[in-house]
Image (tube, rainbow, N blue to C red):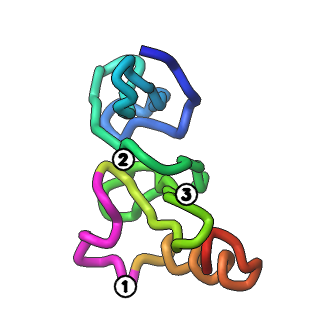
């Protein structure tokens, strides 16, 4: 596995979460200490927003599939599957910022 970057703190033990890429190009996030691991999308550029999900306490990642489509948000799952998505302050803040700056397809 190849280490790509640190993306934030683990909600279980407050240590570093690290983005990894496997030899077959799958990507995952893993905690350095407690070993908590979860998958992230195989395709698309991943950017860290430096914000955290208020419900699950995972770092919010920005996934940009291509320049023509809107980026979407990911924690340990796609943010759009969360029941609080429409009222999530960090996500709404990111959408407003992206719309104002006209970046990530917004």
The residue tagged 2 is 41
Q: Position of residue 84 (x, y in %)?
A: 30, 78
Crowd around label 2: few <14 · some 14–19 · many ≥20 (10 Å): some
| Labels 1, 2: front one | 2
Pick the residue in front: 51 or 24. 24
Q: Position of residue 87 (x, y in %)?
A: 39, 84
Of the 4 image quadrants, the one containing the C terminus is: bottom right
Q: Is residue 29 above or below residue 65?
A: above
Which numbered tag is attached to residue 86?
1
The residue tagged 3 is 51
Which numbered tag is attached to residue 25?
none
SS for tag 3? strand
Instruction: Check whether the beta carbons of the residues at disc 1 and disc 3 lie within 8 A of each other.
Output: no
Q: Is residue 21 above or below residue 8?
A: above
Residue for point 44% across, 26% down = 20
The residues tagged by marks 1 and 3 sit, at their Cα atoms, a distance apart of: 16 Å
Of the 4 image quadrants, the one containing the N terminus is: top left
The residues tagged by marks 3 and 2 sit, at their Cα atoms, a distance apart of: 19 Å
Which residues, given as a range, are shown in magenta? 77-87
Pick the residue in front: 57 or 61. 61
SS for tag 1? helix
Quarter location, residue 15: top left
């Amino acid at each position: 596995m190849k280490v790509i970057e640190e993306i934030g703190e683990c909600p279980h033990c407050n240590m570093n979460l690290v983005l990894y890429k496997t030899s077959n190009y799958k990507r995952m996030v893993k905690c350095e200490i407690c070993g908590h691991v979860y998958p992230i999308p195989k395709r698309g550029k991943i950017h860290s927003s430096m914000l955290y999900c208020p419900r699950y306490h995972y770092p919010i990642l920005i996934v940009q599939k291509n320049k023509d489509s809107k980026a979407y948000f990911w924690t340990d799952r796609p943010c759009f599957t969360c029941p609080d998505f429409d009222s999530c302050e960090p996500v709404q803040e990111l959408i407003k910022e992206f719309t104002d700056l006209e970046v990530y397809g917004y």
